[in-house]
Image (cartoon, rainbow, N blue to C red):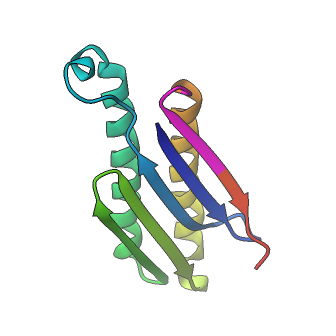
Amino acid sequence: MIQIDAVLDRAGLLKSCKVEGHAGAKGLFRIRNAKADIVCAAVSVLVRTALQLFSGKTGIKVRGAAPERGLLWMEIDYTAEGRDFLSVAGEFLVEGLTGVSKDYPKNCKMTIHRSED
């Protein structure tokens, strides 16, 4: 099971995201469970691409890491210059991950928290 925890700030912009776990099983069962591999691939592509985009954008400061297989986190700060980009790209990421979790609820769970700071 993949667990995704996203935090949005008061303005509704992405503040942080943590992805932990794997969708599929290991060994022979994995061959029969190609759907789980699709879920892992979808989540990985969405989150890693967002992290790369945020990292190269003026007005957005991102800290993040993937210290081990099955774990990736990012924290985001932004200025007025990066706000519009973060609004669009962050919403794209959250909607994409939410869609994966709705389509594959046995493999992926998405939780969205609202920050008060």
Q: Quadrant of residue 99?
A: top right
Q: Nearer the viewer, residue 88 or 99?
A: 99
**Residue 20 lies in the magenta stretch:** no
Q: Nearer the viewer, residue 67 or 14?
A: 67
Horizontal relation, residue 112 to residue 21: left or right: right
Horizontal relation, residue 102 to residue 36: left or right: right
Identify the residue at image location x=34%, y=56%. 49
Identify the residue at image location x=26%, y=30%. 26
Identify the residue at image location x=40%, y=43%. 43
Residue 63 position in % (x across, y down)? 42, 78
92 shown above or below 28: below
Identify the residue at image location x=79%, y=74%. 116
Q: Which residues are magenta?
A: 105-111
17 shown above or below 117: above
102 shown above or below 33: below
Residue 2 position in % (x across, y down)? 46, 41
Q: Residue furthest top?
A: 32
Q: Quadrant of the C terminus?
A: bottom right
Horizontal relation, residue 3 to residue 37: left or right: right
Q: Is residue 18 visible?
A: yes
Q: Quadrant of residue 53?
A: bottom left
Q: Quadrant of residue 23?
A: top left
Q: Is residue 92 visible?
A: no
Q: How many marks?
A: 0
Residue 96 position in % (x across, y down)? 51, 42
Q: Residue furthest front?
A: 27
Residue 32 position in % (x across, y down)? 27, 13
